[in-house]
Image (spheres, rainbow, N blue to C red):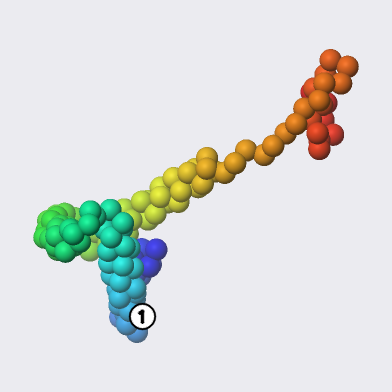
Amino acid sequence: ASFVVRVLGYTQLTSSRLPLLFPLEMLHGVCFSAMWIANVDRLRKLTPHGWPATMLALFSACYSQLGQGLGTVCGGYLFQNWGAIPMFRVAASIPAGLLVAHGVALAIRCRRSMPEPETKSDEVEGEALLVGSDEVV
C-alpha cells in the first residue's frame, strides 16, 4: 500500500508541492524493507535444509536482474508513448489491483477455513426444529 501511495504521490507533485517529495521518498524505505523481509521469511519457510543462501541468491538475481530489467523496458515504453504521469499511474494500479485480489483471496480462504456453526435438529411432529432458533423449517 505504501508503494501505491508513493507512486501516486509522484503524479501529484508540482513546483508548489515539491516539499512533499521528501515524505514520499521516505516511503521507499518502507516499501523495500517490507518486500525484502516478507520474501526472506517466505524463502526461509519454503527452502530445504542447507539451501537458504542459494535460494536467497536466486531471489536476489530475479529481483535485481529480471524484475528491474522488465520494469525498465516496460516503464520506458510507457514513458515514451504515454508520458510520465500515466506511466506512474499504471505502475501504481498494478500493485493496487494485486493488493485487492490478495485481500479478496485471503478473505475467501479465511471464510472457508472457519468451522461451521453447530446446529442440532429435533423432530417435532414431523417438522425439523433448529435448536437455538425461532424458525421452524
Residue at x-position 26% and y-position 58%: 43
Q: Would residue 16 be found to the left or right of residue 61 on screen? A: right
What residue did someone put label 1 on? Answer: 23
Task: Answer above or below: position of 118 versus 69.
Answer: above
Report the number of discs.
Answer: 1
Q: Amino acid at mark 1?
A: Pro
Task: Answer above or below: position of 66 versus 122.
Answer: below
Q: How far across and how far down the image is residue 65, in percent?
A: 11, 60
Nearer to the camera, 3 or 122: 122
Q: How far across and how far down the image is residue 79, in percent?
A: 18, 59
Residue at x-position 62% and y-position 38%: 116
Q: Would residue 111 be found to the left or right of residue 1 on screen? A: right
Pick out the residue farthest to the right.
125
Residue at x-position 82% and y-position 30%: 135
Pick out the residue farthest to the front.
49
- Label 1: how many Cα within 10 Å (few below 14, some 14–19, many 20+): few
The quarter holding residue 118 reads top right
Q: From where the camera sits, is residue 86 visible? A: no
Task: Answer above or below: position of 117 versus 53.
Answer: above
The quarter holding residue 2 reads bottom left
Task: Answer above or below: position of 111 versus 25.
Answer: above
Q: How far across and how far down the image is residue 95, in percent?
A: 33, 56
Classify mark 1: helix, strand or loop: helix
Q: From where the camera sits, is residue 6 visible? A: yes
Residue at x-position 81% and y-position 33%: 131
Viewport quadrant of the N terminus: bottom left
Viewport quadrant of the C terminus: top right
Pick out the residue farthest to the bottom.
19
